[in-house]
Image: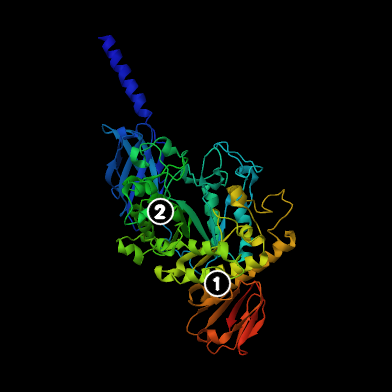
Amino acid sequence: MDVLKKSVLMLLCFVSIQLSAQKIAKIEPPFWWTEMHNTKLELMVYGKNIAQLTPKITNKAITILGITKTENPNYLFIKLELKNAKAGTFTINFTKKNKVITHYNYQLKQREKDAALRKSFDSSDVIYLLMPDRFANGNPKNDSSPELKEKVDRAFKGGRHGGDIEGIINHLDYLQELGVTAIWSTPLLEDNDERYSYHTYGQSDVYRIDPRYGTNEDYKRLATEMEKRGMKLIMDYVTNHWGAEHWMIKDLPTYTWIHQFPGYANSNYRMTTQFDPNASAIDKKYCMDGWFVPSMPDLNQSNPLVLTYLIQNAIWWIEYTGLDGFRVDTYSYNDKEAIAKWTRAITNEYPYFNIVGEVWMHNQAAIAYWQKDSKIGAIQSYNSYLPSVMDFTLHDAISSMFNEDNASWSNGMIKAYENFVNDYLYTNPNNLLVFAENHDTQRLHHLLNNDIQKYKLAMTLIATVRGIPQIYYGSEIGLTGNKDNGDGDIRKDFPGGWPSDTNNAFVKEGRTKRQQELFAFTSKLFQWRKQQPLIHTGKTTHYIPENNVYVYFRHNDKDAVMVVINNSVNPQTLQLSRFSESIKNHLKGKDILTGNTVDLSKGNILVKGKTSLILELE
């Protein structure tokens, strides 16, 4: 009998130890807000064998709508109704046979007044794209982190160089002087890849800023400092994939959290399969479900648990930081029905929030398919709800046309003209992102053979056409690089961002003569643009290029800006009678680039070779 009692006692002790070991490692989102448009919240609870326990909440204002368990006992998903909840802390008890084994105090915060009505980026803005690791090192103490694998190595083009959030904050004055009103930073969330983690697209924790960039609080402080200056912060958000080092990938909540074939299969990258009426099912599957690269597992947004997790994570960052917009990486590689739900959920919560998707395609119809309320998408009863897309076809034209000195039927400035004739395909051309280069393309100065005049033509175009101009860090001081030598070559460190740099292009006295000429031009152009609403929302009337000269007007019923881009090496005389419907009774124009006044009453104007004019008509 004593032996039996002893055995029972030992068993009870063993069970007690097992139950007490069931602790909560993570709950995500880590906290939430009251008074959200969507009053439901799904908590992801992670802990050893946590699914053996039953969550209970005694707070009568909060209802558990459902509990989801998966084949992995380390996860529990709890769906809550928060409609009547008040700000404060409530306790979630995790029980077994009505005994509380562990508990968690979850915080609900008071939502800021008018948070849902935040004004996002739009065509009045100038967006500066930067790679934080390569922009400026404001805090050398965080160059490496003991928690993360890759350490700083500035000598390696593809390594971590030490740029961070503090470096961005330290140079907001510089960006304002340049005329920048919004910053799009490539991702700042944790990326624990062993190599090439500096681009941060292989994220390992989507609720945490990478410690080598700073902290979550630092990111929020960046947003606050920018808001004080009337500037906007755009987060680069990745819905399509995570990094292989993500903690959830290492312990999948469910087999279907990522796409498996089983195991690995690469995307075929043929995004046209998403709308091709003749596409085979297998080609569609491999485009949408295949992994972007082997180190980036493809998320299965069609799994409701995954989709809800991604929606809540995006909203959490908007609400926590006070973000002003998203740029979504590889938008058209996602499950297209699911990504539409993701996008709509965010814009339902924030009706004026702008989201621009990377749809890297090479004809306007294919790109326009992905914009909200697309007439093309409607043919297939599809609506992405995505407000903005990137004008990759204009980028394609810019990549070649300024080197085409002698115009032909299809070369030279006709490429710009032909790009804009297709604007009828877009539901909102003013909400397209226009750019000459970014972190994935050839550097503009490399393409233009470091020709300053050609650079000025390209920037004139970007600054004055419809849409939202985006410039790539360092272009304004001549930073160059050849993508054929690897991505590190087009992502060089900004000169002056590190204390040891001998050339500090952040300040006038530190710039070379060439850097100053480029900076002064770019600053003048975009500072003017900030103050000219005709460029933000005016209509466009353009004229077929002649002799490699492209002329267009941005106008309303009363005022007009005339833009002339002479891409020929030779001076050209323009007969103004051809443009009379746009010039109307305006007798002169002030060139904002030179400050000179141009007399329009003479009937013609002379434009120097490889030169542009931006005339405010008077």
Answer with left or right where residue 209 lies relative to residue 55: right
> Of 100 and 189, which appears nearest the observer?
189
Give x and y (percent) for residue 536. Answer: 50, 72
Q: Amino acid at mark 2?
A: Met
**Could you say where residue 600 lies in the image, as x and y percent from the top left?**
61, 87
Return the residue at label 2: 271
> What residue is shown with label 1?
464
Q: Secondary structure at mark 1?
A: helix
> Vertical placement of 441 versus 617: above or below?
above
The answer to whether residue 302 is seen in the rendering is yes
The answer to whether mark 2 and mark 1 are in CB contact below 8 A is no
Residue 390 appears at what percent x and percent y? 47, 61
Question: Residue 71: x, y in percent?
Answer: 31, 35
Mark-to-mark CA distance, 2 and 1: 30 Å
Q: Please, what is the three-letter code of the amino acid marked with disc 1?
A: Thr
**Which of 46/285 is in front?**
285
In the shown orientation, is residue 559 left or right of residue 496? Answer: left
